[in-house]
Structures are given as C-alpha cells and as structure tokens.
Image (spheres, rainbow, N blue to C red):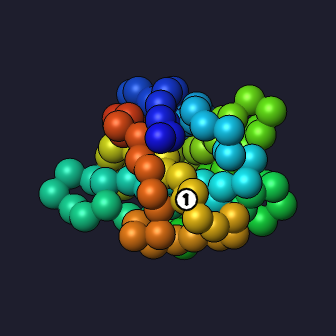
Amino acid sequence: QVQLVESGGGLVQAGGSLRLSCAASGRTFSRNAMGWFRQAPGKEREFVAAINWSGGSTYYAGSVKGRFTISRDNAKNTVYLQMNSLNAEDTGIYYCASDQQRAGIMTHEYEYDYWGQGIQVTVSS
C-alpha cells in the first residue's frame, strides 16, 4: 500500500508562485513514475505534469509548460511541483499520483495506481 500526502497549496495572487510537495510512503518510490493532475471547479480532472523514476525525463501539459516544473527527491520519497506565473485558470484541486507498474512518463489517469487526497490551489485575479 502506498500513501501520498500533498502539501503546499493555498491562496496566491495572479502572477505569484507556489510549490506543491507530495510525500510518498513505500519502498519502491525511487522506481516509480509520478505525476500531477488537477481538477478545476465543474471540470474533469486533467493531466498537469509527469516525471520518470530518475527525474531525468519530464513532460508537461501545454497549458503549464514553461511555467511549472516537476521534480523529485528519491532520498526523501518526495515529488514537487513548482508553479510560477500562476493565473486564475490554474485554480483547482491538485493531486499527485504514483504508478507502481511503470517507471517512465505516464500522462493518463488510468495508468496511475495510487492517488493523494488532493490539495486546493486558488489563484485570485
């Protein structure tokens, strides 16, 4: 069983920054693909960013590319999402996810096995 706990969300003004963290339990973290998704009010959950097992490969949704950075520290069993130049469209609940089966880049919800409880990010305009 893997537990994922997000932190670092909150309220920020447009143009500001936040860094989300996701602490993972489990001894296989360093071999697992990780990802971030988000769900805006009234919308379906969507892919934000993904990172492979080593952190050497990353992939972003077009809407966040150039503004968000995903990274990981395998020694701390933690994945991060640095969010810069935030705008109102970035408002939503952010979820981290872990893929226990694969180590590469995964961009679909069904590829992930475990999910955090989600954390609210609100960007005021």
Identify which residue, 7 or 111, lies in the foreground: 111
* Corner quadrant of residue 23: top right
* Corner quadrant of residue 57: bottom right
Q: Label 1: how many residues lie within 10 Å, few (<14), some (14-19) or many (20+)?
A: many
Identify which residue, 32 or 70, lies in the foreground: 32
Please state the horizontal and vertical placement of residue 87, each as a whole percent of the image. 44, 49
Give me the residue at 77% from left, 38% from top: 73
**Residue bearing the label numbered 1:** 99
Looking at the rendered structure, the kind of residue marked 1 is Asp
* Corner quadrant of residue 52: bottom right
Identify which residue, 84 or 37, lies in the foreground: 37
| Left or right, residue 54 beside residue 32 | right
Position of residue 97 relative to residue 117, above or below, is below
Q: Secondary structure at mark 1?
A: strand
Give me the residue at 47% from left, 41% from top: 1
Position of residue 3 relative to residue 67, above or below, is above
Position of residue 3 relative to residue 52, above or below, is above
Q: Is residue 65 visible?
A: no
Please state the horizontal and vertical placement of residue 31, each as a whole percent of the image. 73, 54
Q: How many marks?
A: 1
Q: Among all residues in the image, which is located at the extreme left? A: 42
Please state the horizontal and vertical placement of residue 49, each as a whole percent of the image. 57, 60
Q: Is residue 9 visible?
A: yes
Please state the horizontal and vertical placement of residue 67, each as a whole percent of the image. 63, 55
Give me the residue at 20% from left, 51% from top: 41
Give me the residue at 41% from left, 40% from top: 116
| Left or right, residue 7 beside residue 41 | right
| Left or right, residue 36 beside residue 51 | left
In which quadrant of the rendered image does the C terminus lie? top left
Identify which residue, 85 or 81, lies in the foreground: 81
